Image (cartoon, grey):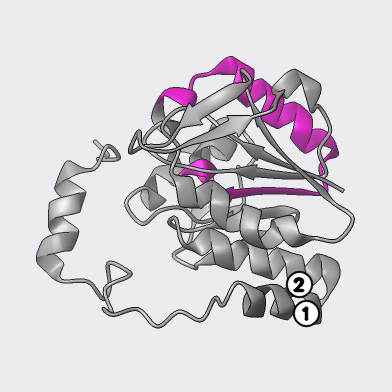
């Protein structure tokens, strides 16, 4: 089974690495990083790069598609090379997935119309513009489409899908070996729990302000 993780400039690192470290442990699978061009693609901070070893044209029919988000997602919304590849790959994929604002790229490709989906909380309502039904759930399954909320939820998505494909015990083993046992120092990981002034501050700065 071939797992294709999409890269583009200014993606968010954990959006890609979370599923890589979890779903990428699927037995008898190959994980490839793909992009419009091969070579390094820097994250949103500019301090880290992941390497795309293959172009989209070289990976036309992956079994699983994973699309990360990040600030670089915005210019990709009108990139015909990426959007056309998503449509082509989706035509034969077993699972088409996203993390964070990667769901907006799936939506822009026309893949989420009429489907339940999630995204980063700042971008959630933006899904409506593409005919998707936004939900605040952390991981959302709708047919073969699996969308995860912001950044860290890609780990949950990866483990959940891994459990479906390889069985609960294998997914539990991966969770154990990665010691994924969240005990955050603050209970501020969602807009419902975080201090209201922080929520409003980030909403005001968001690139997803709807007019």
Image marks 2 and 1: residues in contact by CB distance under 8 Å: yes
Q: Residue at x 19, y 61 (%)?
A: 199
In front of the other: 136 or 41: 41
Q: Is residue 145 left or right of residue 178?
A: right
Front residue (pair 153, 54): 54
Residue at numbered disc 2: 163
The total of numbered circles placed on residues is 2
Please give the name of the residue rendered at 54% of the width and 26% of the height, measured from the top-left corner. 40
Q: Position of residue 30 (x, y in %)?
A: 82, 46
Decide if residue 100 is in sight here: no
Return the residue found at the far left.
197
Residue occupied by mark 1 = 168
- 129 shown above or below 176: above
Q: Is residue 65 left or right of residue 208?
A: right
The quadrant of the image that shows the C terminus is top left
Q: CA distance from mark 2 to mark 1?
A: 5 Å
Category of crowding for the residue at label 2, using alpha-carbon neighbours closer than 10 angstroms: few (below 14), some (14–19), many (at least 20): some
Seen at 14% across and 61% down, the residue is 198
Residue 80: percent from left, percent from top? 59, 16
Above or below, comparing residue 131 to residue 51 in the picture:
below
| SS at circle 1 | helix
Residue 38 placed where, x, y %? Answer: 63, 20
Disc number for residue 127: none
Q: Which residues are magenta?
A: 75-103
Q: Is residue 16 left or right of residue 199?
A: right
User: Looking at the image, which residue is at 46% across and 27% down?
Assistant: 9
């Amino acid at each position: 089974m071939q797992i294709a993780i999409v890269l583009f400039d200014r993606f968010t690192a954990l959006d890609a690495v979370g599923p890589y470290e979890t779903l990428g442990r699927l037995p008898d699978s190959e994980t490839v990083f793909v992009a419009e061009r091969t070579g390094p693609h820097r994250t949103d901070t500019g301090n880290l790069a992941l390497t795309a070893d293959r172009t989209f044209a070289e990976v036309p029919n992956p079994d699983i598609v994973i699309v990360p988000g990040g600030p670089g997602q915005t210019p990709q919304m009108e990139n015909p090379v990426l959007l056309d590849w998503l449509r082509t790959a989706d035509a034969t994929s077993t699972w088409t997935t996203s993390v964070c604002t990667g769901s907006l790229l799936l939506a822009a490709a026309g893949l989420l119309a009429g489907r339940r989906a999630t995204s980063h909380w700042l971008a959630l309502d933006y899904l409506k513009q593409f005919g998707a039904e936004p939900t605040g759930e952390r991981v959302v399954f709708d047919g073969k489409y699996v969308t995860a909320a912001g950044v860290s939820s890609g780990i949950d998505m990866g483990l959940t899908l891994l459990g479906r494909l390889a069985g609960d015990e294998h997914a539990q083993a991966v969770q154990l070996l990665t010691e994924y046992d969240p005990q955050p120092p603050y209970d501020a990981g969602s807009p419902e729990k975080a201090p209201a002034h922080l929520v409003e501050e980030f909403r005001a700065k968001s690139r997803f302000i709807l007019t």
